[in-house]
Amino acid sequence: MKTPSQADMEPRKPGRPRSDEARRAILDSTFALLNEVGFNELSMEGIAAQAGVSKATVYRWWPNKAVLVIDAFLRAVEPELHFTHSEPTLQSIRAQMTRLVNMFVGPLGRTIAAVIGAGQSEPEMLEAFREHWLAVRRLEARELVRNAQAAGEIRPDIPPDTILDMLYGALYFRLLVRHAPLSGDFVEDIFRLITPGMIYQSTSRPARLPE
Amino acid sequence: MKTPSQADMEPRKPGRPRSDEARRAILDSTFALLNEVGFNELSMEGIAAQAGVSKATVYRWWPNKAVLVIDAFLRAVEPELHFTHSEPTLQSIRAQMTRLVNMFVGPLGRTIAAVIGAGQSEPEMLEAFREHWLAVRRLEARELVRNAQAAGEIRPDIPPDTILDMLYGALYFRLLVRHAPLSGDFVEDIFRLITPGMIYQSTSRPARLPE
Amino acid sequence: MKTPSQADMEPRKPGRPRSDEARRAILDSTFALLNEVGFNELSMEGIAAQAGVSKATVYRWWPNKAVLVIDAFLRAVEPELHFTHSEPTLQSIRAQMTRLVNMFVGPLGRTIAAVIGAGQSEPEMLEAFREHWLAVRRLEARELVRNAQAAGEIRPDIPPDTILDMLYGALYFRLLVRHAPLSGDFVEDIFRLITPGMIYQSTSRPARLPE
Amino acid sequence: MKTPSQADMEPRKPGRPRSDEARRAILDSTFALLNEVGFNELSMEGIAAQAGVSKATVYRWWPNKAVLVIDAFLRAVEPELHFTHSEPTLQSIRAQMTRLVNMFVGPLGRTIAAVIGAGQSEPEMLEAFREHWLAVRRLEARELVRNAQAAGEIRPDIPPDTILDMLYGALYFRLLVRHAPLSGDFVEDIFRLITPGMIYQSTSRPARLPE
DNA sequence: AGATAAGCGAGACGGTACGTCCCGTCTTCTG
DNA sequence: CAGAAGACGGGACGTACCGTCTCGCTTATCT
């Protein structure tokens, strides 16, 4: 026996159903134009035109440029870059960072930069970036680090987020400021530099900084 | 003794001289509005109005919003944050990073974020940020690191820029994405984590930091 | 004896029959809104909403705003203002004109003005006004005048329509241009002015009106 | 010696002066399009495009379509149709009415009809029509009638406006409703009909209508 | 009883014009 | 010649209706 709330979900609202074709066309155009002209030069008018859709249809479903861009961005980016769990923690993170770097230097890199950039004056955009992109990955990574800390693989006296911000911060820094190239070597150097500090060192007292 | 009007090479062009009052008013308004409404909502029209100046005067001296904002930004930010050289390298860097964090959490932090953000779609803006802000500091910091490497204080097999990008990348990451707070503790943790890796390790024993 | 379903030619098409309730609601809303906001501000969207009806239903039965408005107008106005035939011609016309003036100054006056106004850019609207409103009354009035001419009450050398256009034109002029008030006195003056000219003058002496 | 208020009138406001070329182009386009498509289909967008002018320029000087149309209308119509004063009153009026009829059947007739029509839902449009078109002519005509009444040419016991509304109302009625043609003959008939009533009849008691 | 047909609400769709805002340029007069 | 004032052509904004459409549901007649 089925309860109404259970089985026949989607009571099918009255009225003409939303055109999924239009939805897709809009998101595609948005994403394409975003990479072409950047966030600032991106116009709702242009998106609608390129999608072969009326402006009203765009505004019916997305209240403004920011959330539309976020939507388009997430759709393109969502399936990317999960961690592998079969290998040792540090190796797994390093592998994921290398894949991230490869993504950053490709067209998606420009888009991510554009989103963070636009987010500086569009709070909800940054929020969406954090919620839907960063948080998802961070959740996995944090878990990985925590487990490694519990297993004695990583020293437990540093908050996982600090560790991750150092690792990924370096990548985002170069992505956004572009003062130096992003490459696999960069990731290698980062790990060469940080692993002595991440590895739990049972034989010595924890390092102390000069005061 | 020379009179100013005589010798020191200012042919003094004919016509009414540029109004320095207008220049200052424009830069002040730009900076104020930038922090108030962000880069995107910032309008040349608004700047001119608030400065009590005609739009033409703004355009006479700055070709577009980006370079005007950069100018205003640099004027406000130029005198900030040099390194001290009297102390050990790591300590000097850490002290400067702490001061940078304090600046990041203040109003100038919003401005820097806005400039990097806007730079994502305004190449010359990012360029100016790199040239006039980042490069200046990086030059000093790189020198510091290089000297420390030469002195055996820091392992020499990691490029100085990689080291600096890890340190500062973490700060800029939090400044721009705002997923976690910026504070002195964060800097502490960063250094606790990274110093074992930065210290040159001639033996297999974990490094001990000089006191 | 015939049953309604049998003989009098209404083959009763299949399918759901038209909702008379919807029809009435639409016409009522149209008429109400027409007087409220005028023809130009009148929107099909608004009519449908106020009638609690879908736009498609409106368009199913009326191809455009003009014929809908005409329909609503005629429904409200049809039963009005016929002539009385028991009295002398001039008196009958004057009485009807007085009643017309009373209608013009009431809410129906605004509607008639709106219809003629809208008719200036909607030919079929003006056409409908002529056919269904003016012609009906004009037919009666013309007959009245013609009989009076035949009876020697009115001079026969002026076309009846000219006479009627002078009489009624004055009223419509004030209705539409609103440069002077409409009142019973105005009708009085019109008749005081025109009757000497309408009365057949067999002699050269200025006409004397019958007492 | 000249006082400032006297001689150098127009102190020449600062700023770029209004472009008279744009002004003329806008008014011309408005008038042309008004006659082409009517008031309802007339769009500010279309006017601006045809005039080679930006929409903002149109809105800078005319707050809405109605007053723009009135302006265009008056510019085209202003120089028309004054009275001649050298002849007897009735003859002068009749001559002017004949000229008015000729104008009514030409393109300006459509425009006037459109203006009165649009005025039914745009009060300020009707107001402007009354002020700038009707009142100007009515002033002359009323003076003419009043003088004629004083001179005993026209009976003095009918308000001049009533007389004029009968005469002109007939013309406007046919212009607006188009149920019968406008022609010189129509004016003739009107005068044949009304003159016996307008002429002061000293020999008889004032006409009384049958009650 | 079931099939077929139309009416109806809801509401999404591609369009067009609205009136506003800001862009970057221009034209004029004043200091 | 700089500067203020402000008009100019241009273009995107976000909104409101247009008239059309696609749904699911209801109400009828016809098999």
Image (cartoon, coloured by chain):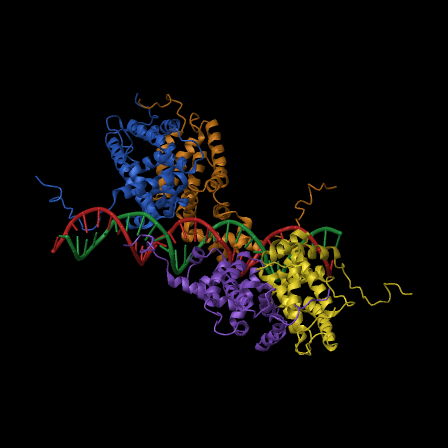
Chain colours: A purple, B yellow, C blue, D orange, E green, F red
> Looking at the figure, which quarter contains the N terminus of chain A?
bottom left
Pick the front one: C27 or C54 = C54
Residue with the most extreme left position? C1
Q: Is residue D16 visible?
A: no
Pick the front one: D132 or A117 = A117
Asked if C207 appears above or below C69 in the picture, the reply is: above
Say left or right for D37 vs D28.
Answer: left
Say left or right for B7 vs D117.
Answer: right
Say left or right for D58 vs B47.
Answer: left
Asked if D51 appears above or below C186 in the picture, the reply is: below
Asked if D137 appears above or below A105 in the picture, the reply is: above
Image position, residue D43 (x, y; %):
45, 52
Number of on-image labels: 0
Image position, residue C171 (x, y; %):
37, 34
Image position, residue A147 (x, y; %):
52, 67
Say left or right for B114 vs B10.
Answer: left
Asked if C176 appears above or below D106 in the picture, the reply is: above
Image position, residue C112 (x, y; %):
36, 38
> Looking at the figure, which quarter contains the C terminus of chain A?
bottom right
Pick the front one: A202 or B99 = A202
* Residue C19, image quadrant: top left
Q: Can residue D22 be seen in this view?
A: yes
Residue shown at 32%/28% (left/top)?
A: C94
